[in-house]
């Protein structure tokens, strides 16, 4: 780390590069990973800390209060000082909410610009003194980096650095935009100095929207500012960048941390029969491709500008799926154990990088001796098939960690097995993936003992999230933060859907004007793609040629009740024609029934929701009859008697209901048994 001179990041990566500066230049590193600033910053941050209902705004669901409290902890470490040898440039990408116009062609035209790159030089001043931070740019820079507000000496306060990081992390919808006061390059009285009265305030959001991998920014900063060290020494920074160079120094190596880079095939999406595209599918696919292309365009431009950079580029790759990878990499926010597992997985992959890229100046770390039952030692022993895994993975404290290890291996084998024979297959440098591609089954982690070993393969139409939760449930994972008992992966999925649904509802409720309905509708559609959550209470009115009914369905998410099982009841009316006309017809009767209703998970979706019900009750007829009369000859509603109903129904968009009720009237008081079929259509509402 003593050779580190440059760090760039976007979104959450902007916070990580700031923490990396403190880790490299600050106080001595703690002995245990759980005592590091990285752990203390990221592991406690879950959904419960970010979602504060009373702090939801029209532009963001999450609150920054927890992140700001963590920023105070980081500031304390910052103020304790950095070593005088520390001289690092920090690059951060952000995105403007409203583009600024950049004059070009001698001012004859202007181009809109939403991407912004900030460059800060951080120089340590020893223990007990906060480091010196300055804007590291020049008006001649082709990147046109803006300036953060400074004092008269050109120094940037930590508060400005903090706000820049929070702006880069302001993922749209999750967080509201963050306001920053900045000066345009070359628009201030003194170069590198941006006084408060010279600055303009604008709103910014996530820097990863257009540049999620700011490697080009890093290479550009190195090209303009780094000077090769004498006699093979460490490169140093120029006092002022000098744009115009065509190549970065040849003795500068880069490590490119891409969360999507993996040493195994990408997990495929659900496999559905190929059919002709309709317009929403086409637009959705184009939009997804546009976002991916926009986020990687800077990397593509870099490889065009400086092709030989690839020879000085170390690319760490994940060797096993992360626990928090499903749900667009947001699953980790729902369980602390997921974040802890992924933290150690990052350490495992970092060790692989050091080992594989020793000649790139990254050094080599010593192998773990495997004598302590630490999570990393257990992970290494299992992943690398080392002896002694039973010992280092033993203990109740690692019970859920062992399950996460097993699920990670199962998921790896699922994608590698499915990629066998693919046209783009290559030699993955992953021994476990190679075994899976050869037809092998996942190894079993010592200490994982489910009642029945699940099918580790992913179903053709099974979402990655559902596949992951299914395996976790089968192995008995404790969903502690979600409050779900072991083995109930169905409830875990429902809990995730519920908390997202509440957040969407709260976001819709605070919208001004006419935005509430649109936000609620769009948000519910997105949430229902994860899992459909039926309303706790639903009311319906159904009318048909023989039976009209008003009913209710009541559900619960109590763990003791199987998911999908509900209680339903209805008041039915027969013979309404006789009530409202003088033309005769079936005798009027009213029917009171109740019973269990079951909504199979496979029949629940945002568009259609199916259900089955078995109801029993009593029919009260208005027709009087003697005990010796067989009232069945006069119709099913001609006498009061018990009734049993079987219902098959479906609701579309939670509003339009279609059902068919099969009725059986058992023999009663001398009357023969009867049956009837009662179709109907109507409305269903959720109060």
Image (cartoon, rainbow, N blue to C red):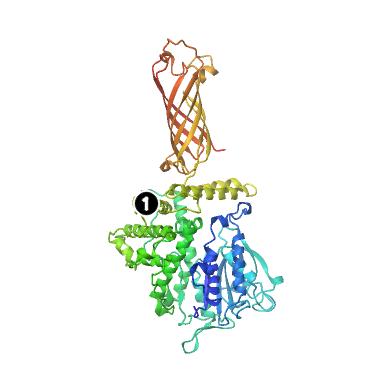
Q: Tell me residue 329's x, y (percent).
A: 47, 59
Report the residue marked by disc 1.
Answer: 271
Q: Residue at x 49, y 63 (%)?
A: 294
Relative placement, left or right, of 238 versus 278 is right
Label 1: few (<14), some or many (≥20) within 10 Å?
few
User: Is 172 rendered above or below residue 426?
Assistant: above
Q: Tell me residue 311's x, y (percent).
A: 41, 77
Name the outermost residue toward the bottom: 231
Relative placement, left or right, of 379 versus 297 is left
Query: 267 and 349: which one is in front?
Result: 349
Quadrant where the C terminus is found in the figure: top right
Q: Residue at x 36, y 48 (%)?
A: 273
Does any portion of residue 630 appear in the rendered image? yes
User: Is 123 rendered above or below residue 319?
Assistant: below
Name the outermost residue toward the right: 197
> How many circles with numbers are drawn on the protein?
1
Does any portion of residue 425 appear in the rendered image? no
Q: Tell me residue 9's x, y (percent).
A: 52, 69
Q: Quadrant of residue 109?
A: bottom right
Q: Tell me residue 598's x, y (percent).
A: 44, 37
Q: Residue at x 59, y 75 (%)?
A: 120
Query: 140 and 385: which one is in front?
Result: 385
Q: Residue at x 61, y 63 (%)?
A: 69
Q: Secondary structure beneath disc 1? A: loop
Query: 585 and 616: which one is in front?
Result: 616
């Amino acid at each position: 780390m003593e050779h580190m001179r440059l760090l760039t990041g976007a979104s959450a990566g902007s916070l990580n590069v700031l923490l990396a500066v403190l880790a490299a230049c600050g106080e001595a590193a703690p002995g245990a990973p759980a005592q590091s600033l990285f752990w203390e910053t990221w592991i406690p941050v879950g959904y419960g800390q970010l979602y504060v209902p009373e702090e939801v705004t029209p532009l963001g669901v999450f609150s920054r209060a927890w992140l700001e409290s963590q920023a105070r902890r980081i500031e304390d470490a910052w103020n304790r000082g950095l070593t005088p040898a520390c001289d690092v440039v920090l690059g951060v990408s952000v995105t403007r909410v409203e583009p600024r116009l950049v004059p070009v062609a001698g001012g004859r035209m202007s181009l809109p610009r939403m991407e912004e790159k900030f460059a800060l030089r951080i120089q340590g001043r020893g223990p007990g003194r906060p480091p010196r931070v300055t804007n590291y740019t020049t008006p001649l820079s082709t990147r046109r980096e803006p300036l953060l507000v400074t004092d008269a000496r050109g120094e940037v306060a930590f508060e400005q650095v903090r706000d820049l990081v929070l702006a880069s992390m302001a993922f749209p919808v999750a967080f509201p935009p963050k306001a920053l006061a900045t000066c345009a390059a070359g628009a201030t009285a003194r170069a590198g100095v941006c006084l408060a009265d010279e600055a303009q305030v604008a709103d910014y959001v996530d820097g990863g929207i257009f540049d999620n991998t700011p490697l080009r920014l890093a290479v550009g900063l190195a090209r303009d500012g780094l000077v090769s060290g004498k006699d093979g020494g460490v490169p140093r920074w120029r006092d002022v960048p000098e744009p115009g160079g065509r190549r970065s120094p040849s003795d500068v190596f880069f490590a490119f941390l891409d969360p999507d880079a993996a040493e195994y095939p990408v997990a495929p999406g659900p496999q559905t029969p190929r059919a002709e595209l309709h317009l929403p599918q086409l637009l959705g696919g184009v939009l997804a491709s546009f976002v991916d292309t926009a986020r990687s365009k800077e990397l593509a431009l870099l490889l065009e500008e400086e092709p030989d950079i690839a020879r000085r580029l170390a690319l760490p790759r994940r060797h096993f799926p992360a626990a928090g990878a499903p749900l667009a990499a947001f699953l980790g926010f729902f369980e602390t154990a997921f974040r802890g597992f992924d933290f150690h997985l990052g350490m495992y992959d970092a060790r692989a990088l050091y080992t594989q890229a020793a000649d790139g100046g990254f050094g080599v770390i010593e192998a773990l001796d495997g004598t302590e039952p630490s999570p990393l030692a257990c992970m290494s022993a299992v992943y690398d098939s080392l002896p002694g895994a039973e010992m280092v993975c033993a203990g109740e404290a690692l019970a859920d960690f062992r399950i996460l290890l097993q699920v990670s291996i199962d998921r790896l084998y699922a994608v590698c097995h499915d990629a066998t024979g693919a046209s783009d297959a290559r030699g993955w440098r992953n021994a476990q993936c190679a075994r899976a591609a050869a037809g092998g089954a996942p190894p079993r982690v010592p200490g994982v003992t489910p009642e029945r070993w699940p099918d580790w393969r992913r179903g053709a139409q099974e979402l990655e999230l559902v596949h992951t939760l299914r395996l976790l449930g089968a192995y008995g994972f404790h969903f502690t933060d979600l409050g779900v008992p072991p083995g109930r992966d169905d409830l875990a999925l429902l809990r995730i859907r519920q908390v997202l649904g509440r957040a969407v509802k709260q976001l819709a409720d605070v919208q001004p004007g006419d935005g509430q309905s649109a936000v609620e509708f769009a948000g519910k559609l997105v949430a229902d793609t994860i899992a459909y959550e039926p309303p706790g209470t639903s009311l319906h009115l159904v009318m048909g040629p023989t039976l009209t009914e008003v009913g209710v369905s009541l559900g619960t998410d109590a763990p003791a009740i199987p998911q999908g099982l509900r209680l339903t009841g209805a008041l039915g009316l027969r013979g309404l024609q006789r009530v409202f006309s003088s033309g005769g017809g079936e005798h009027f009767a009213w029917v009171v029934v109740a019973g269990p209703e079951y909504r199979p998970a496979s029949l629940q979706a945002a568009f259609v929701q199916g259900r089955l019900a078995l109801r029993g009750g009593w029919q009260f007829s208005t027709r009087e009859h003697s005990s010796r009369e067989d009232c069945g000859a006069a119709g099913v509603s001609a006498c009061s008697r018990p009734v049993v109903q079987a219902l098959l129904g479906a609701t579309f968009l939670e509003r339009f209901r279609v059902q068919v009720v099969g009725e059986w009237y058992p023999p009663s008081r001398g009357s023969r048994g009867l049956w009837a079929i009662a179709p109907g259509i109507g409305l269903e509402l959720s109060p």
